[in-house]
Image (tube, rainbow, N blue to C red):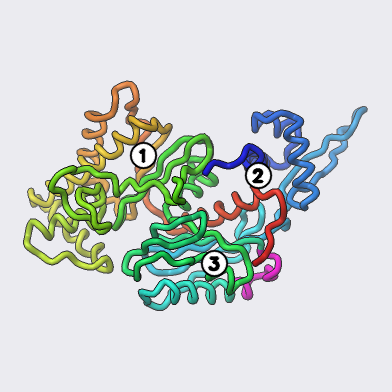
Amino acid sequence: MRLTDHEFNRLTVLRHMRAAQPVSRTDLASLSGLTGGTITQIVRELVQRGMVMEQRVETGGRGRPRVNLSINPQGAYAVGATLTAEGPFLVDIIDLNGNCVSSTSTMLRGTQQLADLADQISGVLRDAIAASPVAHDAIAMVGIGLPAVLDNRTGTVLMLETFEPGPYPFADAIARQLGVPVRLDNSINLLARAMHWFDDGSDVDDFTLVVLDLGLGAACYQNGQLVIGSHGIEAELGHTKIVPENGRRCQCGALGCLQAYSAISGIVGQHCDAHGLAEPSYLVMRDAVAEMVQRARAGDIATQGIFRRAGHYLGIGLANHINMQDPDRILILSQHPEIVSLISEALLASLAQNVLPHLWDQAKLAFGKLDALSYSRGAAAMVLERLYQAREPLQQT
């Protein structure tokens, strides 16, 4: 699902313009690596669409005045929204520069029906737009992130934990109610977009983001583009097979998945297996792993072993990825740094043992704390990417 050359070039121009504005065409060519002719063609299109503004600057000398370019923040508005693991549904309304002009947080009603969830989100979005300083007809696109397995080409939810099975045309259902184009993506892809646009990954075109939470997810950027498979699904690191025979059963139904050992759900599940306990629901697993952390810190050898195993297997999974893809950087995020501290030693040892020596550099691996606000920033980046790529103004549904 690679962008066309023209889409990629336009996205590149606007990203560099956003970072360096006001900027001349000559400087933009130098920053982007594109030819002057390509820059001229793309800028002409963007000015005609009202996405880019020109400003003539008198130099005081002979010759033509310098023309600086900048993004027109009012050229389009978009909505970035995400359903967080903690419950609130976050909504940000952004201008074309990515600046937030309005923000809301709403708790949704409990449900297990995807159609009901889509209806609730539609109502929250409608209210958020109405309460903002932006007119409804000025909204060019809505981007939504869900912690789900989904097809981001069609906006179809395939599997969302604790909900009825998919597939369900989630994006279409919301677009029909709002009358605005809607794009849907997995929450982890949104985190990777936020990193690439706003954070430490903004100067790196090849990196992998890993999220260690109730599940275990990943997203990969290569050559400045988010890698999406032919089915529109993000990288499913957690469902790569790490124990090929007699492995633990994963929530996906398969045996031996990495998630069944290294995600919070897998860590808690192994503890329950060892003590003959029923595995708790997703809703209380964070409490269960917090108790395990206390046990491990108090010197419980069996519990420490579960955390070491989680780190060891995660290291093998990442080693396979590094040996195949050799990303410039790997960032592991978790909202539970106490878990990272218990698995990191085994993880690093496993990486050092299993990565090809000429590919291993501990400096490429970093840990960070998961920030819920990054999801909405990633949703904003998703819609900005789409608006930046589009050759024509997006048509409302």
Q: Are marks 1 and 2 in contact (CB under 8 Å)?
A: no
Mark 2 = which residue? Answer: 18
Quarter of the image where one finds residue 278:
bottom left
> Per the image, is 390 magenta?
no
Which residue, given by chain and number where applicable, does mark 1 sit on? 366
Residue extent of the magenta highlight: 129-139
Q: Position of residue 216 (x, y in %)?
A: 31, 51
**Marks 1/2: CA–CA distance:** 27 Å
Which image quarter holds the C terminus?
A: bottom right
Find residue 172 and name its label.
3
Residue 96: % across, % down: 66, 54
Q: Name which residue type carries label 2.
A: Arg
Q: Secondary structure at mark 3?
A: helix
**First of labels 1, 3 by sequence position:** 3
Do the numbered discs 1 and 3 sit on residues whose CB atoms are within 8 Å? no
Please say if 192 is above or below 92.
above
Q: Can you give x and y, in whole percent of width and height, for residue 160 in the image?
A: 36, 64
In the displayed structure, does residue 25 sit left or right of residue 241? right
Residue at screen point 47% across, 63% down: 82
Report the front residue among 201 and 151: 151
N-term-proximal mark, 2 vs 3: 2
Residue 163 lies in quadrant: bottom left
Amino acid at pointer 3: Asp
Query: Which label belongs to residue 336?
Result: none
